[in-house]
C-alpha cells in the first residue's frame, strides 16, 4: 500500500462505518438529528480521503 493511499483507506473505512452506523441508529432510535450528523460526518470523511489522495498525487507529480 503506497503512502498516499493509507490515509484514503483509513478515512474511507471510518466514513463507511459512520454511514452504516447512522442507518442502524435511524432504524433503532428514530432520532433523525443524530443519524444525519453521523451520515454527514461519514460523507465528509470519504470526501476528505479522496481530496487528500488527489492532492498528494499532484504534489508528487509537481516535485518530480
Image (tube, rainbow, N blue to C red):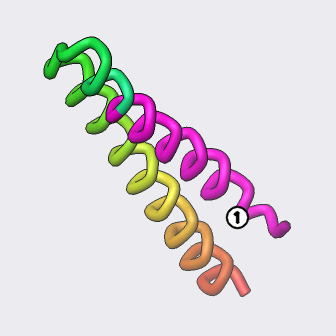
| Residue 26 placement: quadrant | top left
- Residue 2 within the magenta-colored segment of the rendering: yes
* Drawn side of residue 48 relative to residue 27, left or right: right
Q: Nearer the viewer, residue 42 or 58?
A: 42
Q: Quadrant of the C terminus?
A: bottom right
Few, some or many C-alpha atoms within 10 Å of disc 1 (few <14, some 14-19, many ≥20)? Answer: some
User: Residue 53 occupies which quadrant of the picture?
Assistant: bottom right
Label 1's element? helix
* 10 over 28 or under it: above or below: below
x and y percentages locating residue 29 in the rendered image: 27, 12
Q: Is residue 13 magenta?
A: yes
Where does residue 14 sit, x and y in percent of width and height?
Answer: 56, 39
- Give the image quarter of residue 19: top left
Compared across the picture, whether 30 is left or right of 44 comes to: left
Position in image of residue 32 (x %, y %):
15, 21
Highlighted range, magenta: 1-23
Q: Residue at x 18, y 14 (%)?
A: 31
Direction right: furthest residue:
1
Q: Residue placed farthest to the front in the image?
A: 28
Determine the residue positioned at 70% across, 64% down: 5
Q: Which residue sits at x=33%, y=35%?
A: 23
**Disc 1 target residue:** 5
Label count reads 1
Residue 59 vs residue 36, the one in the foreground? 36
Q: Is residue 18 above or below residue 15?
A: above
Amino acid at each position: 500500500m503506497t503512502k498516499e493511499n493509507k490515509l484514503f483507506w483509513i478515512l474511507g473505512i471510518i466514513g463507511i462505518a459512520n454511514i452504516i452506523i447512522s442507518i442502524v441508529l435511524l432504524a433503532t432510535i428514530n432520532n433523525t438529528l443524530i443519524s444525519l450528523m453521523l451520515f454527514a460526518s461519514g460523507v465528509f470523511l470519504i470526501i476528505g480521503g479522496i481530496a487528500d489522495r488527489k492532492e498528494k498525487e499532484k504534489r508528487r507529480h509537481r516535485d518530480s
